[in-house]
Image (spheres, rainbow, N blue to C red):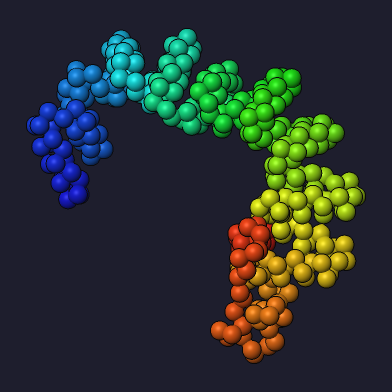
């Protein structure tokens, strides 16, 4: 046993003497990790008797490992009572997983619902979305949808997007689109973007474009970039360039990179150069990927710095009038180069 562990145990033991339930559980865990199993159960029992749900869960696990199924079941029931009384949503979800492993589907469903109610009451709807993803991984899509529905009802935007995806996955195209449209009416276009991506992946390109346009009309720059890519893939570079430019004006960093690339590929080297210099005028040109264009940087008047002339006088200046998108782009090209 390390000195740090011994010191921690000594501190927790003092807290136990001061009648701290949390200290009882913490000390029990420390002793269990240190291999001292003999004194663990009495500590958990003392905490459990004071209504600590996680102590009851620990006792259930210990009794299960000892082959005492009846005692384990009793501890699980007491854990559920204590967790519901205290609103301990983590303990309820842990208990749900334990009951699932035991093959008790009915109790699992009930406990998941109780955990969701407790999480919403505690204002932690993000936890429900995380749990829902785990339920999908476990093949329990019904519980996953119940969790995100509960979080959506509580006003979680993330949950609403997850619910759109779940309903689309199970073939409820009408339900998923109705949810996405409802969210868009309140200014949340993320559901439309998710739906557009899923419809495109399913081969329904026309419907995907319709959904993306609805989001774009609401000012969503991500949707504009989706449409720009679609137009480019369809052989309409002029429309693609216009859409990417609109996204850049809305502050979409990726769009700046795309517009420079599109102009270069279209042969508009002067236009690409002008846009690149506008980006450089706000700083970050080196990380933006313009090393090949201006290997020695730019002079304050905007002209490329000649070889051997780099110095303080050649530092790139920032313009307060430069669009916001140009000011935040340093990491974009680096990500794109790493994907290449």
The answer, for residue 94, to whether it is visible in the render is no
* Residue 328, x across and y down, in percent: 60, 59
Residue beneath the point at 82% across and 54% down:
241
State the residue lying farthest toward the bottom.
Answer: 308
Residues 212 and 300: in front is 300
Could you tell me which quadrant the C terminus lies in?
A: bottom right
How many numbered dots are placed on residues in this image? 0
Residue at 57 percent across and 31 percent down: it is 157
Q: Position of residue 323 (x, y in %)?
A: 66, 59
Q: Which x, y percent locates residue 135?
A: 53, 25
- Residue 177 visible somewhere in the drawing: yes
| Picture quadrant of residue 55 | top left
Q: Nearer the viewer, residue 24 or 151?
A: 151
Question: Would residue 20 appear left or right of 319 to someone viewing this image?
Answer: left
Above-or-below relation of 286 to 52: below
Residue at x 70%, y 19% (from the top left corner)? 175
Question: In this view of the protein, which residue sits in the foreground, 326 or 150?
Answer: 326
**Residue plotted at (72% across, 59% down):** 257
Picture quadrant of residue 25: top left
């Amino acid at each position: 046993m390390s000195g740090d562990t011994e010191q921690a145990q000594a501190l927790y033991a003092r807290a136990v003497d001061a009648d701290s339930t949390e200290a009882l559980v913490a000390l029990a865990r420390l002793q269990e990790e240190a291999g001292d199993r003999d004194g663990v159960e009495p500590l958990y029992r003392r905490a459990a008797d004071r209504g600590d749900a996680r102590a009851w869960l620990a006792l259930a696990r210990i009794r299960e490992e000892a082959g005492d199924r009846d005692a384990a079941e009793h501890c699980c029931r007491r854990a559920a009572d204590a967790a519901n009384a205290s609103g301990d949503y983590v303990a309820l979800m842990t208990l749900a997983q334990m009951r699932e492993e035991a093959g008790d589907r009915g109790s699992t469903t009930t406990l998941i619902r109780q955990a969701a109610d407790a999480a919403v009451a505690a204002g932690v709807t993000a936890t429900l979305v995380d749990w829902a993803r785990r339920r999908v991984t476990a093949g329990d899509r019904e519980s996953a949808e119940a969790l995100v529905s509960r979080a959506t009802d509580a006003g979680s935007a993330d949950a609403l997007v997850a619910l759109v995806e779940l309903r689309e996955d199970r073939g409820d195209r009408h339900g998923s689109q109705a949810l996405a449209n409802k969210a868009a009416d309140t200014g949340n276009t993320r559901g439309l973007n998710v739906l557009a991506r899923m419809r495109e992946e399913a081969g329904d390109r026309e419907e995907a474009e319709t959904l993306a346009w609805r989001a774009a009309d609401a000012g969503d720059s991500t949707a504009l970039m989706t449409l720009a890519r679609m137009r480019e893939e369809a052989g309409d570079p002029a429309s693609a360039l216009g859409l990417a430019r609109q996204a850049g004006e809305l502050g979409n960093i990726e769009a700046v990179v795309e517009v420079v690339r599109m102009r270069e590929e279209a042969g508009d080297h002067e236009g690409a150069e002008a846009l690149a210099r506008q980006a450089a005028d706000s700083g970050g040109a080196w990380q933006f990927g313009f090393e090949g264009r201006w290997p020695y940087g730019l002079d304050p008047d905007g002209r490329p710095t000649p070889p051997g002339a780099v110095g303080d006088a050649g530092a790139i200046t920032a313009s307060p009038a430069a669009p916001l998108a140009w000011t935040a782009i340093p990491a974009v090209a680096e990500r794109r180069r790493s994907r290449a």
